[in-house]
Image: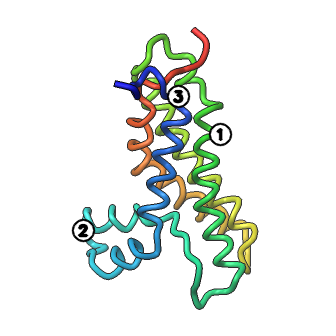
Amino acid sequence: MALTNRYKSAPGAGTLAALILVLVFGSPWYVDWARDNTDPDSAGGWFLRLLAWPAWRFDSDDSIQEIFADDLRAILVVVLTFLFLYLLPGSQLARARGTISQFFAGWAAFVFAGAFAALFTTLIRTNPSLLGAFQAAGDGAEYGLFVGWIIGIATLGGYRGRR
């Protein structure tokens, strides 16, 4: 088999999983479907709507500034996921590939990425406030907490650098 766990890096695999999550579940088509077809008062509906949090879009009735902030937030979730996966020591210092530390490092990286992406993009919105920035960071952290386990699983078994 040409592609095995031996050839993937933990930061690369986690970033690819984050990119797929943002592209698929943040797409305008999924966001519209989740809004129209799920019940926000059920656990499943809440989760399906949460998956759509880093929504990106090209057209809307909102201002260009708001659209740019939403698109930048989706991009930053992916970029910051890579950055935090690279910087967090769990995936790099684990004694063996596939350990639980890689899982938690991937999960934590996604929590941090969601929180910081929301925090940074709040600053370019039309009426930024400190309270709005804190609330947005909380929403991003909530997204990372409940969806980040997917990134944690993706990083399991990844190459951790020099041995």
Residue 11: x %, y % from top left: 56, 34
Instruction: Give the quarter of the figure containing the N terminus.
Output: top left
Please, what is the three-letter code of the amino acid marked with disc 2? Ser
Upstream in the sequence, badge 3 or badge 1? 3
Q: Residue at x 42, y 63 (%)?
A: 25
Q: Residue at x 73, y 79 (%)?
A: 127
Residue 76: x %, y % from top left: 64, 55
Q: Do callouts 3 and 1 mark residues in contact (Cβ within 8 Å)?
A: no
Report the Cα–Cα distance between label 3 and label 1.
13 Å
Q: Which mark is residue 9?
A: 3
Residue denoted by label 1:
83
Please, what is the three-letter code of the amino acid marked with disc 3? Ser
Report the Cα–Cα distance between label 1 and label 2.
34 Å
Quarter-wise, where is residue 148 in the image? top left
Q: Which mark is residue 17?
A: none
> Does residue 122 appear to the left or right of 37 in the view shown?
right
Q: Secondary structure at mark 1?
A: helix
Q: Residue at x 28, y 68 (%)?
A: 45
120 vs 74, nearest the viewer = 74
Residue most extreme to the bottom = 61
Q: Residue at x 65, y 31 (%)?
A: 87
Alpha-carbon neighbours of circle 3 within 10 Å: few (<14), some, or many (≥20)?
many
Q: Which mark is residue 42?
A: 2
Please, what is the three-letter code of the amino acid marked with disc 1? Leu
